[in-house]
């Protein structure tokens, strides 16, 4: 009996020792993030370009064959700079013909003046007839009118010759050529496009449905595609009233709040549309855990590095994230990876690459 008592005591002692030496729960590494409230809703992101608000489509004022182009696309030109030249042969011939007519009429005018003086002298001496004097004076007036007409023809022919040179009426940048050297163009036909670089704007194409329901407080963020750090805000200046039949988009022109130097004409940009909304919490789906029909998240105490579960209500979810009605506050840190292997009060190791 005494021996049995000793054996039972030894067994109890061993059992107690085994319980005291049970290994602690493992410290699990987790990814976490700090909860942030979103007060802006993204409506979309669209590609566009920086363009000049004011562009001029220039053409020759006379028809002819283009002899040469003086500048290329992208060239910066000053006011009055030469852009292109027509073959001036026709205009030169017209000027020579007009000058010849002027010389002939000038000679006729000199004779008419002399005849009028002679008839006036004869009439003053009483040997000339009044009818002959009237004829001479009428011929002088007619010849003077013909002389003025011939002079105008010369001036017009000289202008036509000057119009064979296409020059700028303002400083700008050549953005497009619509005719090549050797091509015959008509008067007024579009030959070159000249943009004024002093006022720039962003140009994008919006889906017709979005363009029709843009909220009044929409915010446009314009950023360079190569360097998103170069950005500014913008407002709508105009939206085309009709959608393009092929793409069902409407072109929107945006006035920039600022124009960074990197925003040169033709720069590719990315435009993000957003509008203000009531603050809401959006979390990745990996942060949610489904337990007995309820949804919960795991809150992380950064001081003790332990976790505790908390039930939340999900308003909506998509393929990547879920929108919560409540249950978590901005500034709290939650676990976003490894939630299915956690226990209340468990020690965790925060991964240094966790999102801030």
Image (cartoon, grey):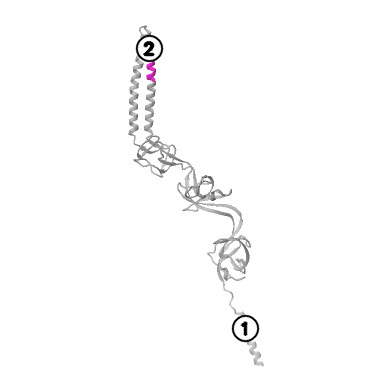
The magenta span reads: 135-144
Say above or below: 356 vs 191. below
Q: Circle 2: is it few (<14), some (14-19), or many (20+) Cα within 10 Å?
A: many
Distance between mark 1 and mark 2 Cα atoms: 154 Å
Q: Earlier in the sequence, mark 1 or mark 2?
A: 1
Q: Nearer the viewer, residue 55 or 93?
A: 93
* Residue 11 shown left or right of residue 130 in the figure: right
Q: Which mark is residue 338?
A: none
Where residue 82 appears, as percent x and y from the top left, is: 39, 38
Where residue 264 appears, as percent x and y from the top left, is: 46, 47
* Residue 24 shown left or right of residue 78 in the figure: right
Labels 1 and 2 touching (C-beta < 8 A): no
- Judged from this view, the residue extending furthest toward the front is 245
Say above or below: 129 vs 189. above
Q: Quadrant of residue 151?
A: top left
Q: Quadrant of residue 70?
A: top left
Q: Which mark is residue 133?
A: 2
Where residue 279 appears, as percent x and y from the top left, is: 61, 56
Q: Quadrant of residue 56?
A: top left
* Residue, disc 1: 15
Q: Is residue 197 magenta?
A: no
Say above or below: 5 vs 300. below
Q: Nearer the viewer, mark 1 or mark 2?
A: 2
Residue at 64% in and 88% down? 8
- For the C terminus, give its image quadrant: bottom right
Secondary structure, mark 2, is helix
Residue at 61% in and 82% down? 17
Q: Circle 1: is it few (<14), some (14-19), or many (20+) Cα within 10 Å?
A: few
Where residue 206 appears, as percent x and y from the top left, is: 51, 50
Secondary structure, mark 1, is helix
């Amino acid at each position: 009996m005494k021996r049995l008592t000793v054996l039972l005591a030894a067994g109890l002692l061993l059992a107690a020792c085994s319980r005291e030496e049970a290994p602690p729960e493992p410290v699990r590494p987790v990814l976490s993030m700090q909860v942030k409230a979103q007060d802006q809703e993204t409506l979309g992101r669209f590609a566009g370009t920086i363009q000049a608000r004011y562009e001029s489509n220039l053409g020759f004022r006379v028809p002819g064959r283009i002899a040469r182009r003086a500048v290329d696309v992208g060239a910066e030109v000053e006011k009055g700079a030469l852009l292109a030249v027509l073959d001036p042969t026709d205009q030169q011939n017209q000027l020579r013909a007009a000058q010849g007519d002027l010389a002939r009429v000038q000679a006729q005018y000199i004779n008419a003046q002399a005849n009028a003086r002679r008839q006036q002298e004869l009439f003053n001496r009483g040997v000339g007839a009044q009818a002959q004097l009237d004829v001479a004076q009428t011929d002088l007036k007619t010849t003077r009118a013909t002389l003025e007409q011939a002079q105008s023809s010369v001036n017009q022919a000289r202008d036509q010759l000057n119009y064979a040179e296409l020059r700028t009426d303002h400083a700008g940048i050549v953005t497009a050529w619509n005719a090549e050297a050797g091509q015959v163009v008509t008067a007024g036909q579009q030959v070159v496009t000249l943009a004024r670089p002093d006022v720039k704007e962003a140009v994008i194409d919006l889906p017709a449905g979005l363009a029709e329901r843009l909220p009044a407080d929409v915010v446009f963020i314009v950023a360079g595609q190569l360097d998103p750090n170069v950005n500014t805000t913008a407002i709508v200046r105009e939206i085309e009233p009709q959608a393009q039949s092929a793409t069902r988009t409407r072109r929107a022109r945006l006035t920039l709040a600022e124009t960074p130097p990197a925003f040169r004409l033709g720069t590719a940009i990315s435009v993000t549309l957003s509008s203000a909304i009531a603050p809401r919490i959006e979390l990745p789906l990996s942060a949610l855990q489904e337990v007995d029909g309820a949804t919960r998240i795991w809150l992380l105490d950064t001081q003790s590095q332990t976790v505790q579960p908390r039930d939340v209500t999900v308003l909506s979810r998509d393929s990547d994230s879920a929108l919560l009605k409540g249950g978590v506050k901005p500034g709290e840190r939650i676990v976003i990876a490894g939630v299915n292997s956690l226990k209340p009060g468990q020690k965790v190791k925060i991964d240094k690459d966790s999102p801030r």
